[in-house]
């Protein structure tokens, strides 16, 4: 196990130079609002479940407020995840070395994705779900009731990172049917108590902070629109079918396609043998698929909950093949898998070669941070996010404003707030909830009131940042001003354009 953890830390070291993307910057900003004694949704708006903000706040508390802190935190978290997956693999496969292989496949699959898709809620959730599965499948248990309580608690906590993962609660319920008499009678109440406790604490917390209404709206009303905004107008069944086909294409084409390729025959093997532990693994895999489809977006990080069960199922397939290689059919199948693997593994090999080259280049001083950022997100490229431009704007804000000045960004660029160490004068740290199809008029009134009171020194308007998948509209922030005439008028009356940096136009306050 020590070797596996060392491997996980070695592989995870590629993330130490990773910057924040939009999502990570949002989590970090809200996490720092939490550390200041304030509350998510009420004092800093986002649509993600609450647990991710507190994990980022924890990372900042332990390791200091920097982008590297969360990457170190995630690296340690994923090393622990790989170890738990190895234990689950050992339990299912009844072999220590094969369990080690399960953990190794997981960690190699996790870090093959880029900076945008790591340190996400889905990635953090795997440790909790894997721990719950290990507790449920462990053969020697002093107290079945405590095991079910712990599993329920862990599954609920994972769902506070991503709600669909709470469907894993059906696994211990199904497993309880095999219990008899008193053990079954005590297991289910213990499971319910463990599962409900995190939700009760969450509700009481937001209610006590007068933020329960904000929590409910952002998570379940706005959240519903957010999830369904990317659906086509040709019916739910057609959209679901299209998403299933697109999901399959991504799984076959992604850098972790090798474990998916091996998982497909493993499904047949599991259904044929019908072993309790392997069926539980298949259920976990199915919940991962449901999670991907329920997001309605098919972003790469939505697939992260699949990596753990797919890694174990891949080893199940390899174990079966190794036992059956004497037959010609199995040898032909093994040869086909080897040939396909050689072709598919070019993607992750190329990704890791690039990642370690950048890591060693920055460590040796051959590559500067801005050169690395330019590689990740080049200036001038037609994209709705350009990391170097964010840094350029942040540098300008630090040099032209005081640390006590407010700055407001009409766009989705919370990284600028973090890099410039300037505060947003409103809870809306990005503008999507203010111009999306389902935007509330009282939110817009709230924004105008906040700007009128705080009078930020600079207002930044973004262009070329159309986000139809989350707004339901094919317009950028500049065009979105047309849907918000009060803000447009406020900007024209009180501010004057000063300069343009990339796709940002900076307006300065006109002092009368």
Image (cartoon, rainbow, N blue to C red):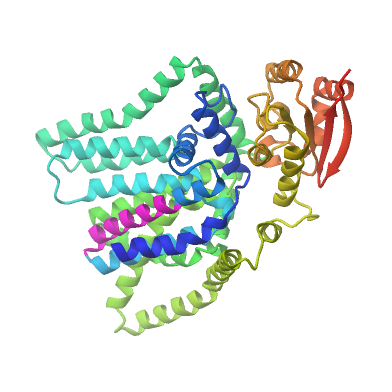
Q: Does the magenta stretch include residue 29?
A: no
**From the viewer's perspective, is 359 left or right of 259?**
right
- Disc tally is 0
The C terminus is located in which quarter?
A: top right
Q: Does the rendering let one see residue 15?
A: yes
Towards the viewer: 504 or 318: 504
Towards the viewer: 432 or 437: 432
What percent of the width, then of the height, locates residue 8?
40, 61
What percent of the width, then of the height, locates residue 394?
72, 42
Q: Is residue 93 magenta?
A: yes
What percent of the width, then of the height, locates residue 1?
28, 62
Q: Quadrant of residue 264?
A: bottom left
Report the magenta stretch's main SS: helix
What percent of the width, then of the height, locates residue 501?
82, 45
> Which residue is at 15% across, 31% downward?
185
**From the viewer's perspective, is 180 left or right of 312?**
left
> Which residue is at 47% across, 58% downward?
110
> Which residue is at 56% across, 64% downward?
363
Q: Please, is residue 9 above or below residue 180 in the view? A: below
Q: Quadrant of residue 415?
A: top right
Q: Please, is residue 251 above or below residue 440 in the view? A: below
Q: In this picture, which residue range is highlighted in magenta?
A: 75-94
Q: Does the rendering let one see residue 267?
A: no
Towards the viewer: 498 or 471: 498
């Amino acid at each position: 196990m020590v070797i596996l953890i060392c491997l996980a830390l070695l592989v995870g070291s590629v993330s130490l130079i990773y910057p924040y993307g939009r999502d990570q910057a949002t989590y970090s900003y809200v996490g720092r609002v939490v550390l200041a004694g304030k509350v998510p949704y009420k004092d800093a708006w986002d649509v993600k479940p609450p647990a991710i903000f507190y994990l980022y706040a924890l990372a900042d508390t332990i390791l200091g407020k920097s982008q590297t802190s969360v990457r170190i935190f995630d690296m340690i978290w994923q090393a622990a995840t790989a170890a738990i997956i190895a234990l689950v693999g050992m339990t299912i496969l009844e072999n220590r070395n094969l369990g080690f292989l399960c953990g190794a496949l997981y960690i190699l699959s996790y870090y093959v994705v880029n900076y945008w898709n790591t340190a996400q809620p889905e990635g953090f959730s795997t440790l909790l779900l894997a721990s719950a599965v290990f507790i449920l499948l462990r053969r020697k248990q002093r107290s079945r009731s405590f095991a079910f309580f712990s599993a329920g608690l862990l599954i609920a906590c994972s769902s506070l990172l991503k709600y669909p993962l709470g469907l894993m609660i059906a696994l211990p319920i199904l497993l309880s049917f095999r219990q008899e008499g008193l053990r079954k009678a005590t297991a289910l109440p213990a499971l319910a108590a463990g599962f409900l406790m995190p939700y009760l604490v969450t509700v009481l917390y937001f209610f006590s902070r007068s933020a329960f209404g904000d929590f409910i709206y952002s998570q379940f009303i706005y959240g519903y629109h957010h999830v369904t905004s990317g659906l086509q107008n040709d019916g739910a069944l057609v959209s679901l079918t299209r998403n299933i086909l697109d999901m399959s294409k991504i799984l076959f084409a992604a850098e972790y396609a090798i474990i998916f390729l091996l998982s497909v025959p493993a499904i047949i093997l599991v259904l044929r043998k019908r072993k309790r532990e392997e069926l539980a693994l298949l259920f976990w895999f199915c919940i991962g698929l449901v999670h991907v489809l329920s997001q309605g977006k098919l972003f790469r990080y939505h697939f992260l909950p699949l990596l753990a069960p797919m890694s174990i199922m891949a080893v199940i397939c390899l174990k079966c093949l190794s036992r059956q290689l004497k037959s010609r059919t199995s040898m032909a199948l093994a040869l086909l898998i080897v040939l396909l693997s050689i072709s598919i593994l070019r993607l992750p090999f190329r990704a890791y070669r690039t990642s370690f080259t950048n890591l060693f280049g920055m460590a040796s001083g051959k590559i500067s941070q801005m050169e690395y950022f330019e590689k990740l997100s080049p200036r001038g490229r037609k994209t709705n996010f350009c990391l170097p431009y964010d840094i350029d704007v942040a540098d300008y804000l630090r040099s032209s404003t005081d640390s006590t000045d407010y700055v407001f960004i009409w766009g989705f660029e919370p990284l600028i707030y973090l890099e410039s160490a300037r505060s947003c004068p409103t809870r809306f740290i990005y503008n999507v909830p203010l111009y999306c199809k389902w935007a509330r008029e009282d939110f817009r009134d709230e924004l105008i009131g906040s700007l009128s009171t705080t009078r930020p020194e600079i207002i930044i308007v973004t262009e070329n940042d159309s986000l139809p998948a989350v707004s339901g509209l094919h317009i950028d922030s500049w065009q979105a001003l047309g849907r918000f005439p009060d803000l447009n008028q406020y900007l024209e009356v009180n501010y004057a354009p000063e300069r343009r940096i990339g796709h940002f136009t900076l307006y300065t306050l006109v002092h009368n």
